[in-house]
Image (cartoon, grey):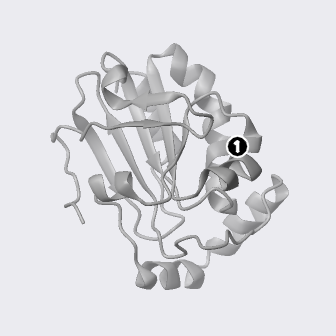
Amino acid sequence: MAHQLQQGMVAPTFRTVDFQGNPVSLESYRGNKVLLAFFRNSACALCNLRVHHFIGRHPEWQQKGMRVIAIFESPEESMHTYVGAQQALFPLVADPKAHLYDLYGVETSEEKVKLTLADANTKSFAAEAEAAGFPLTPEEGSNFNRIPAEFLIDERGIVRLAHYGRIVTDHLPLEVIDNFAAGG
């Protein structure tokens, strides 16, 4: 397991393909800001809701020179069935063996999942996801204890913000990402 990244570190580079087979390389995004988001799995209702929010903001982010890469600890087949159905205009990467998760120090924590289930806000997030058309759906064989993480990476490949979720529902506020996209 890699150590967690800190602000000011160079983001580890990687080459992979998205779930449709298109090449994705972090180096090819130099000159652009990048939101690199690690999700749980492609069937995760809360993850799908988050992707739905990203899709809504993506045109504005892209206009400001920020790109998005979303990683899921899921096999490619699941990606087509679940999150891929959202037709995101940014790469959705299947990483079923969690190589990129390890590279970025994204953790697995049974304790944090228990805290999520006990958190008062989790029910309202789940209800919002359900209302948006993303019912709670278990993905067979997925890592139930995966905790999401998000990284804001600048044009030179430097991590400007590394956000490791305290619980499953803990993400960067969209306003923070908007500010980063706008040059903040």
Q: Residue at x 65, y 60 (%)?
A: 46
Q: In the image as oriented, which residue stretches furthest toward the left?
A: 9
Classify 145 as above or below 27: below
**The N terminus - image quarter:** bottom left
Query: Where residue 126 sits in the image (x, y, percent)?
Result: 71, 67
**The C terminus - image quarter:** top left
Q: Which residue is mark 1?
A: 84
Q: Is residue 123 left or right of residue 159?
A: right
Q: Is residue 73 left or right of residue 130?
A: left
**Count of labels shown?**
1
Q: Residue at x 67, y 72 (%)?
A: 140
Q: Quadrant of residue 109?
A: bottom left
Q: Callout 1, which amino acid?
A: Gly
Query: Where residue 66 sits in the image (x, y, percent)?
Result: 44, 23
Query: Where residue 27 sits in the image (x, y, percent)?
Result: 30, 25
Query: Where residue 21 sits in the image (x, y, percent)?
Result: 57, 33
Q: Quadrant of residue 92?
A: top right
Q: Residue at x 41, y 59 (%)?
A: 98
Question: Circle 1 sits in a helix, a strand or a loop, which is it?
Answer: helix
Q: Is residue 5 visible?
A: yes
